[in-house]
Image (cartoon, helix red, strand yellow):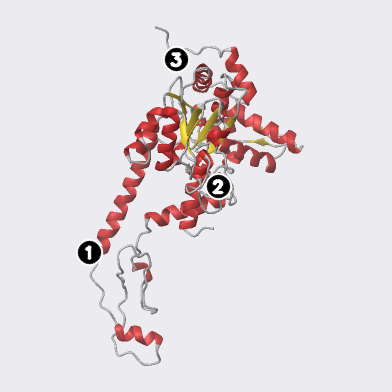
């Protein structure tokens, strides 16, 4: 039996696909993903492309389409996370005139437009459950019904879906249909994260720097060995998309210079952390990330519990109604002097702690209520938006959530 760890030279078709779609890199896991896409292309099976945000999943449906018998028909890419929930059925399946307010004419949906071709559903985990049921029917029988219609239509279409979400967990949580998951994932193709692609990071960085220099006619930057090492040991949560952003910033402000590790780190977000790259054929594991995240949440919960115990064990502070009234009136207060330290107890989840305006109060002893998880999430989103100069797409990629989720949270937290 052949050893799976032995590296083999990429086939001519793999090299052709990489060149045609601008895929740069020689990592074994990346080459294996391209080869897998080419092999499944001639066979009309549903394909699920998985991988982290920014890892380049969008190239693989194009490879599948262009190496299939459908290559001369339409190819339509749909970002399911960017379409509002109320209109996504109409976008995908079309609608009849008068089906809803504003439907002044009948309209074809993407499944009808791409008949005979391929449709790419990016961020498929963001589909509402009702839309998932409609999609399942298309996959099983090729049938769909327009919004506002009662007649069944047929379509001959190949579906390729992509997600950065653990769909099995989404199934367990009731957010994704189990039958649809197995229909979509007849063939799975996993795209490795950038941090596990070794020397590809250096190749991509130089390609992005050269492209920037040629496009804007500025002196090109170069990267020292220490900068290469720093890039290999950075986690790159935004993957290739983040690397391109960092290189272009560096190419603009450090034009013509050699960039070393210290200079490079000044362009990396504060969330950077050391990382030991994968070796050989080892791949990135979602389980490892999940354990790290759960560990952080557990530690945070322990701290919150400890602070809550301190609050619960603090003796209740006597109220001073007359003195409180004196703050807002000119009448003297017949109350004793305020104590030197004061804890004001408020209802649960209240994040405001107050003390009387008195020079004898020792404010260092005033106990603060810990921020809520919602407050922490709001602050993380605010900082991500600041780091990305308000670009919501880039902030969503950094936070590893969909744009639609980010838009909703921006609205909920009043960050417009």
1 vs 3, front mark: 3
Q: Position of residue 371 (x, y in %)?
A: 38, 59
Disc 3 secondary structure class: loop
Residue 328: name its quadrant: bottom left
Identify the residue position indicated by label 1 in the image.
Answer: 313
Q: Position of residue 4 (x, y in %)?
A: 43, 13
Residue 38: name its quadrant: top right
1 vs 2, front mark: 2
Disc 1 or 2, which lies upstream in sequence?
2
Mark drawn on residue 200: none
Of 188 and 54, nearer the camera is 188
Of 261 and 374, nearer the camera is 374
Looking at the picture, does residue 136 appear above or below residue 71? Answer: below
Q: Quadrant of the C terminus?
A: bottom right
Looking at the picture, does residue 340 appear above or below residue 205? Answer: below
Q: Is residue 145 left or right of residue 245?
A: left
Q: Position of residue 370 (x, y in %)?
A: 35, 59
- The residue at the far right in this view is 217
Q: Which residue shows up at 46% across the image and 53% down it?
A: 409
Disc 2 or 3, which lies upstream in sequence?
3
Disc 1 or 3, which lies upstream in sequence?
3
Mark drawn on residue 5: 3
Disc 2 secondary structure class: loop
Residue 249 in sight: yes
Q: Quadrant of the N terminus?
A: top left
Residue 220: name its quadrant: top right
- Distance between mark 1 and mark 2 Cα atoms: 65 Å
């Amino acid at each position: 039996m052949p050893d799976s760890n032995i590296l083999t030279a990429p086939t001519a078709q793999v090299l052709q696909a990489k060149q045609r779609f601008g895929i740069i890199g020689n990592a074994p896991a990346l080459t294996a993903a391209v080869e897998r896409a080419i092999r499944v292309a001639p066979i009309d099976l549903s394909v699920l492309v998985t991988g982290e945000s920014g890892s380049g999943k969008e190239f693989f449906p194009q490879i599948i389409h262009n190496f299939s018998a459908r290559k001369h028909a339409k190819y339509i890419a749909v970002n399911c996370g960017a379409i509002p929930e109320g209109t996504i059925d109409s976008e995908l399946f079309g609608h009849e005139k008068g089906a809803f307010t504003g439907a002044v004419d009948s309209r074809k949906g993407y499944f009808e437009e791409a008949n005979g071709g391929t449709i790419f559903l990016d961020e498929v985990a963001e589909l509402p459950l009702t839309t998932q049921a409609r999609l399942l029917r298309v996959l099983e029988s090729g049938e769909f019904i327009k919004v506002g219609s009662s007649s069944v239509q047929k379509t001959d279409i190949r579906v390729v879906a992509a997600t950065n979400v653990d769909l099995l967990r989404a199934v367990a949580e009731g957010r994704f249909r189990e039958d649809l998951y197995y229909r979509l994932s007849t063939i799975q193709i996993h795209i490795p994260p950038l941090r596990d692609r070794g020397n590809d990071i250096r190749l991509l960085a130089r390609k992005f720097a050269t492209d920037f220099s040629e496009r804007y006619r500025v002196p090109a930057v170069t990267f020292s060995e220490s900068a290469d090492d720093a890039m290999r040991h950075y986690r790159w949560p935004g993957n290739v998309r983040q690397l391109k952003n960092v290189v272009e910033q560096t190419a603009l402000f450090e034009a013509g210079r050699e960039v070393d590790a210290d200079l490079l780190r000044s362009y990396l977000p504060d969330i950077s952390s050391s990382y030991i790259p994968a070796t050989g054929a080892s791949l990135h594991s979602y389980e490892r990330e999940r354990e790290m995240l759960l560990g952080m949440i557990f530690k945070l919960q322990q701290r919150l519990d400890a602070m809550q115990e301190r609050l619960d064990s603090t003796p209740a502070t006597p109220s001073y109604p007359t003195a409180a009234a004196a703050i807002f009136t000119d009448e003297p207060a017949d109350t004793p002097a305020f104590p030197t330290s004061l804890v004001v107890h408020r209802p649960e989840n209240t994040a405001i702690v107050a003390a009387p305006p008195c020079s004898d109060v020792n404010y260092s002893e005033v106990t603060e209520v810990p921020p809520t998880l919602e407050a922490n999430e709001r602050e993380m989103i605010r900082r991500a938006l600041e780091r990305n100069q308000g670009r919501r797409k880039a902030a969503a990629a950094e936070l590893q959530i969909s744009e639609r989720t980010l838009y909703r949270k921006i609205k909920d937290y009043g960050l417009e």
